[in-house]
Amino acid sequence: MNRRRLLAGAVGAGAAAAGGALAWWRLRPAAADQLWHLGFASPTGGTVAMAPLRGRPLVLNFWATWCAPCIKELPQFERFHRDFAARGWQVVGLAIDNAGAVREFLQRTPVSYPVGLAGMEGADLMIALGNPNGVLPFTVVFDAEGAAVQKRLGETGYEELLRWAQPR
């Protein structure tokens, strides 16, 4: 009898989780809309406001100073930024880290694209944008209308960025 109750409880919990996941999946596109209303402190001062970035394609990369694959891929984003900025592409890095660590890291390894401090709250944003486990690194590509058109969990390379930048 106890086994049946346990099984029934487990099935009920699984159904509830699946229902919650389905609701989250259906509401998820709203996260991309909300992104454009956000601003993030810059480790060098000021704010990285997302609203002015809408209207041109954007590569948004979530990273951290303690994440080895994140550090490995940063030069790829820097290269893409240099090669594609003249074509209208933008790159923004959102650090899931503390300001001091990011500032210190960027002094040693500077990048020319904007970096915002998303902190641990950035994990919630990653989840809302389609990264249910909050895995780093995480990259989302937005088209000029502000819609997410590509997502990548894990390390991204320059060749992949090139493919994403090709006209559809």
Image (spheres, grey):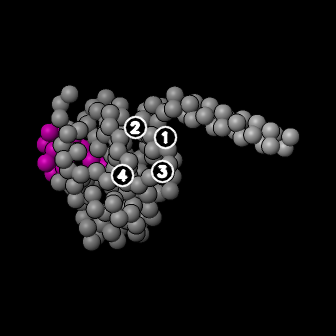
Residue 154 is marked as 4
Residue 57 position in % (x across, y down)? 26, 37
Question: Given the image, on which type of amino acid does mark 1 rest?
Answer: Ala
Question: Given the image, on which type of amino acid does mark 2 rest?
Answer: Trp
How packed mark 2 is, by other alpha carbons closer than 10 Å (few <14, some 14-19, many 20 or more), is: some
Per the model, the C-alpha gap separating discs 1 and 3 is 10 Å
| Sequence-first disc among 2 and 3 | 2
88 inside magenta stretch? yes
| Sequence-first disc among 1 and 4 | 1
Residue depicted at 52% across the width and 28% down the height: 26
**Helix, strand or loop status at disc 2:** loop
| Sequence-first disc among 3 and 4 | 3
| Sequence-first disc among 2 and 1 | 2
In this rendering, would 16 be left or right of 152? right
Question: Given the image, on which type of amino acid does mark 3 rest?
Answer: Gly
Q: Nearer the viewer, mark 2 or mark 4?
A: 4
Magenta part of the chain: 80-92
Residue 36 is marked as 2
Residue 128 is marked as 1
How packed mark 4 is, by other alpha carbons closer than 10 Å (few <14, some 14-19, many 20 or more), is: some
Residue 134 is marked as 3
